[in-house]
Image (cartoon, rainbow, N blue to C red):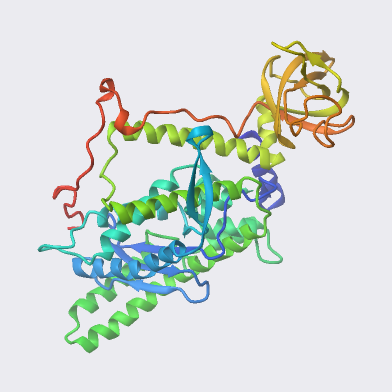
Amino acid sequence: MSTLAAVAALRATATGRAERLTTVRHSHVDDHPFVLVPLTLAGEACAPLAALAGTDPKQPALLTVRQPRNRAERFRFVERLAALLLPYIDQCRTADTETYTVGRGADKEERQRFLRAPQLLVPGGEGIAYVRLLGRLTRLRAVEGPYAVDPSVPLLGKWLTWFADRAEFPGSCLLQAMTRLLSAHWATGQSPAEDSHLASLLAWIDPPDGQTGAQAAREAEDPLRFPPTGPATDVVFDRTLHDLMSRYDKAGDDRGREAVGRQIDRELHGQMLPTWELVWRGVELLRELPEGGHVAERWSYDRRLFTEYAAYLDEDGRPQARRDHAVGAARRLARMEEAMARYDAQRAFDDPLVMAEYELTGEAFTGVVTARDEDRFVPGARAPKWRPTITVRTELPVRLTPGTEIKCPARPGQKAEIVEILPDGESHTVVIQLNGGFNRARKPPAPPGTLAEVGETVTYTSVDPQAMPSVLPAEEDTPWTHGGPPEPYEPTDEDAEEIWE
C-alpha cells in the first residue's frame, strides 16, 4: 500500500466513508458490458453450477446445472453460455472500423480495427480465475469422435482464455473484476482482503442514507442478505443445495424431477441476484467519474488486439497452448513489464492524486514559475539552437539530478531537462531547459501557451508514458542461442485430457 493510500484508508476509518484515491476514472467502462456472475459446485475445480449473464441489468439470463457431476449437463451449460457470449462478441465484430497507422517512416502501415470491443465484467478476482480455468477446460475439446462437443464449446474456450490472458496486463479493460476496479478508485477503512467482498466494499463507497460505511459494511457481511459473490458458494447454502440435488436424483419421473429442478433454479437465482445487482451498481458509480485522458488510448489498443485475435481465429483458429514456450514467455513478460510502466505513467499524467505519489518518491516535483528566459540559445553543430529556460521554485526537496530528462503533464509533448538545482533553505529553485514542443517554432517568440508563464504552477516528472518499449526479435528470428524459432503449437490428445472427471 502506498503512503497516500494508507492516509486515505486512515481518513476513511475516521470518517466512516470511503475516500477517493483518484480524481478521474482510469478504466474504460463500456456502454454495454457483458456481466458474468458464476457459481461452481463446492469441492470441484471448475464444475459449473450456475451463472447469471448478459448485458441487460434488468433481465439477466439464468444458466443452471441441476446435476453438476454429470458431464453432459456441464457441457450443455457451456453451450448455453456460448449462445450468450459469442453473439455479443460477434456484434462487436460487425461494428464499423477505423483506420490507424503503425510503424514509422518507410515501415509505416495503415490497418483497420473495430470501433467496438467486448468487455467482460465479473464480481471479483476469483471470477477471473474461473474464466481462465473454464477456458482451459473447453478450448481443447474435440468436435469429432467419442467425446465430441458442440463446436461452440472450444470456440468459447479460446475467447475465454484470450480474455483471461489480457486481464494480466495492466491497463487492459477487456476482462475486469468489479472489486478491483472499485478498490483502484476508492480507499475504505477495511483490509484489502475485506475489500474483495463486493457488498461490503460498495457499502463503504455508497452507504444507505443515515449509515456510515462501516455500519453498512457490517450488515453487508450477512450471507443471508448478500451471499458470496462466487464462484464459491456459501456453506449453509451448500446443505440446501445438497438436499435439493438428492431429491432431484431420487425423483421417480420426469415431472417430479422438473419440479425439483425448478426449485433448484429458484434457489440458485436467489443466491446470484444480489451480486448481479451489486456489479451493476458498481458500473453506475464508475460511470459517474470523469474519464482519464489516456483511457481512450488504452481502449483503442484493446480494440486493436480484439481485431487481430478475431482475424487470427478466422485464418488459423488453433487454440492457445497449455503453457507458453520459453520464447513466448520471455516476450510476454517483457510486454507485461512495459504495460505496467506505461499504465502507471499514464495514470500519473492524468491524475494529480496519482502524481502526488511520485512527488513523495522523488520522481516528480511541483512549483511556481518565478522566471523564464525566452531568448536563450545554446551552441549547436551548425548553428545556435533555441533552448529557452524556466525557473521553478518548489517548497519540497527535489531529488532529481541535473541532466535528468523530465516532462510536464500540462504539456506532454514538450521535452525538457534539468539544468541546475539550487537549494534555498527548505525550498529549491530548479532551472529547466525546454528542448521542444513549440509547434515547430525555431526562434522566439514562443507560440502562446507553449512556454509556462511566470506565476504558473507546474509539475515536472521523470516518468514518461511515451517511453520506447524494448524491441525483441520476431519469434521466427529467435537466435540458436535461445533455442531457435519455436515449433508451431499443435493440440494433442494429452492436451485435451478430461479434467472434470
Q: Residue 101, how many percent across, how many down?
A: 53, 44
Q: Residue furthest bottom?
A: 255
Evaluate whether residue 129 shows in this view: no
Evaluate whether residue 155 shows in this view: yes
Q: Residue 75, how many percent across, how many down?
A: 24, 66
In this rendering, would 345 be left or right of 384? Answer: left
Q: Residue 469, how many percent across, how many down?
A: 50, 30
Tell me the residue at 78%/20% (across/down).
Answer: 386
Q: Quadrant of residue 62?
A: bottom left
**Who is closer to the viewer here, 318 or 5?**
318
Q: Quadrant of residue 450?
A: top right
Q: Residue furthest left?
A: 146
On screen, 1 above or below 59? above
On screen, 251 above or below 442? below
**Who is closer to the viewer here, 85 or 414?**
414
Q: Residue 170, how many percent across, how many down?
A: 50, 42
Tell me the residue at 47%/71% (across/down).
Answer: 273
**Who is closer to the viewer here, 385 or 222?**
385
**From the image, which quarter does the N terminus lie in?**
top right
**Who is closer to the viewer here, 185 or 400?**
400
On screen, 266 above or below 322? below
**From the image, which quarter does the C terminus lie in?**
bottom left
In this rendering, would 133 be left or right of 202? Answer: left
On screen, 329 above or below 216? above
In this rendering, would 437 be left or right of 473? Answer: right
Q: Quadrant of residue 499?
A: bottom left
Number of marks drawn? 0
